[in-house]
Image (cartoon, rainbow, N blue to C red):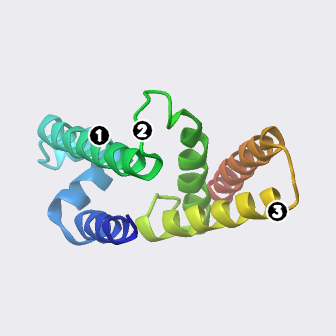
Amino acid sequence: LTIVSILTLFLVWFLLQKTVFGRHLYAIGGNTEAAHLAGIDVSRTRLIAFMLSGFGAALAGLMYMSRVASANPTQGAGLMLDAIAAVFIGMTMNAQGEPKVLNTIIGVLFLGILSNGLTQLNVDSYVRDILVGALIIIAVSASRLEKLSR
């Protein structure tokens, strides 16, 4: 699982940072109308992005299923908050306020360390979720304040 995860992260990083498709995605995310006026086929790029996202979700589901040796449609329901928090923590570390793969990895590692530390301290999972939610609020607020100061 670790090798597949590392290969997937490298592939996503390469796709977003080093290809024309990645630049088109960032352009569409920044301003859809401007991207369209610049000649980017927004509908086609979005379709490909959603297809790749679906493939990634299927791959993640298979990896998670192999880890817990069972399949249940609600198994990953609690992971959404962590995923959102990792992206927003990564965006806070970025000067442009854009989600970047490497910063998101740092956000994931930070949340993993936080989760393990709270588990070692016998902190209830509800308190952990409240802390993660507070981190999201802090990250979004910090990003917004930085944009306003520019």
Mark 3 or mark 1: whose residue is earlier in sequence: 1
Considering the numbered disc 2 on the image, is that residue within a helix, a strand or a loop? loop
Mark 1 or mark 2: whose residue is earlier in sequence: 1
Instruction: Measuring from the top left, give residue 129's x and y in whole percent.
Output: 74, 42
The answer to whether 68 appears left or right of 88 in the picture is left
Cβ atoms at labels 3 and 1 below 8 Å apart: no
Q: Disc count in the image?
A: 3
Q: Residue at x 36, y 52 (%)?
A: 63
Is residue 129 shown above or below 115?
Answer: above
Tag 3 residue: 120
Is residue 103 shown above or below 50?
Answer: below
Q: CA distance from mark 3 to mark 1?
A: 46 Å
Instruction: Measuring from the top left, give residue 81's x and y in whole percent.
Output: 60, 41
Q: Which quadrant would the N terminus be assigned to in this image?
A: bottom left
The label nearer to you, 3 versus 2, is 2
Q: Residue at x 12, y 39 (%)?
A: 44
The answer to whether 136 appears left or right of 123 in the picture is left
Tag 2 residue: 70
Q: Which quadrant would the C terminus be assigned to in this image?
A: bottom right
Instruction: Measuring from the top left, give residue 48's x and y in whole percent.
Output: 16, 43
Is residue 8 shown above or below 86?
Answer: below
Residue type at the position of mark 2:
Ser
